[in-house]
Image (cartoon, grey):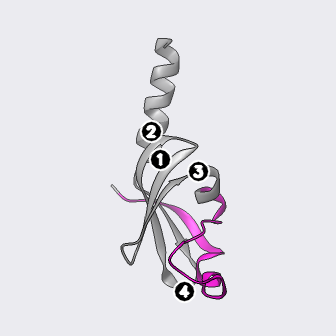
Amino acid sequence: MHPIHCETYFHQYIERLNEVIYYNGGHTARILNYRTSSDIDVIFDDGFILYNTTYYEFNKGSLRRTDIKKTDTDKYDSIARRMFKAY
């Protein structure tokens, strides 16, 4: 792998790991593991872990929880505010 590509990937990894988004109702989701932009694990504030999702879906706020019925997912569908990073 080219050194510049490695440096860019490492910077992106550090920048996105532990990124937090806030959903309506005060719920949060945080990036738990970041392998590539198309393979991340996300942990929700209640401890549920969503494996192998994409950074695009996380960033857009359209993560689909598999443990909640379709009618209950509206509380996780829209983002109230973003731009907080926990370190």
Amino acid tagged 1: Arg
Q: Quadrant of residue 24?
A: bottom right
> Contact (CB < 8 A) between labels 1 and 2?
yes
The stretch of residues the image draws in magenta is: 59-86
The x, y position of residue 67, in whole percent, is: 50, 77
Residues at discs 1 and 3 in contact (Cβ within 8 Å): no
Question: Circle 1: is it few (<14), some (14-19), or many (20+) Cα within 10 Å?
Answer: some
Residue drawn at x 56%, y 42% as measured from the top left: 37
Can you tell which mark lies on residue 54?
A: 3
Q: Front-most of 30 and 70?
A: 70
Residue 22, image x and y in percent?
A: 53, 72
Residue picked out by circle 1:
16
Q: Is residue 26 above or below residue 84?
A: below
Residue 53 - label = none
Residue drawn 58% across and 50% down?
A: 55
Disc nearest the viewer among 2 and 3: 3
Q: Distance between the residues labelled 1 and 2?
A: 5 Å
* SS category of the residue bearing label 1: helix
Q: Which label's residue is closer to the chain start, 2 or 4?
A: 2
- The question of residue 71 being in magenta is answered with yes
Mark 3 Cα-neighbour bin, 10 Å: few <14, some 14–19, many ≥20: some
Question: What residue sits right under mark 2 in the picture?
Answer: 13
Indicate whether residue 14 is drawn in magenta: no
Which amino acid lies under the numbered mark 4 shown in the image of this protein?
Gly
Which is more foreground, mark 1 or mark 3? 3
SS label for mark 2:
helix
The residue wearing badge 4 is: 25
Between tags 4 and 3, which lies in front? 3
- Which residue corresponds to the image point at 44% horizontal and 39% vertical from the top-left? 13
> What kind of residue is marked 3?
Thr
Residue 2 percent across, percent down from the top left = 50, 11
